[in-house]
Amino acid sequence: MKKKIGEITLEVIKLLNLPLSQATPVYVGITNIAHMASEHSYEFYRFFDKIPNIISTADYVRLKSEDNSIEYAKSFGKYVKLAIRVAGDGNYYARSLYFIETNRVENLVKKGEFKSLTKK
């Protein structure tokens, strides 16, 4: 069973040059929830309900070339990273949710990998 938890916005699609249509849905399934809860339980229980907010109001986004995941980073005092990947069924799923160090975010911004969604 899958549940829709957000949409990949047109801004993200354009910024990352993704071959997607506007408002592509993002889902979470039981296996995704189990993975996030077991691998990063603190972040999962603290931020799982904030995933729609992370997707819609992230500070940074990037396309990770190694696995074509879309990574969102949002600051809640500390940065939380949400990774979304396309599955075999062609749908996008939230796959991981965990803290990312500020210096790592800053380095990815300097390298041009993380694109700002907050500065115009």
Image: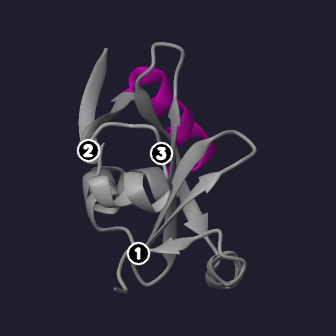
Tell me, yes or no, whether the two marked residues, 1 and 3, touch with CB atoms within 8 Å: no
Counting from the top left corner in percent of width and height, residue 65 is at 71, 48
Upstream in sequence: badge 1 or badge 3: 3
User: Relative to residue 79, is residue 99 depicted above or below?
Assistant: above
Gap between marks 2 and 1, in whole Å? 16 Å
Q: Secondary structure at mark 1?
A: loop
Residue 13 relative to residue 65: left or right: left
- Mark whose residue sits in front, 1 or 3: 3
Residue depicted at x 37% and y 31%: 28
Q: Which residue is mark 3?
A: 18
Gap between marks 1 and 3, in whole Å? 18 Å
Counting from the top left corner in percent of width and height, residue 49 is at 27, 52
Q: Which residue is mark 2?
A: 6
As drawn, the label of residue 59 is: 1
Residue depicted at x 26% and y 44%: 6
Please name whichever residue, 97 or 24, is drawn nearer the observer in this view of the structure.
24
**Residue 113 lies in what quarter of the image?**
bottom right
Neighbourhood count class around disc 1 (C-alpha, 10 Å): few under 14, some 14–19, many 20 upward: some
Mark 3 is on which residue type? Answer: Leu
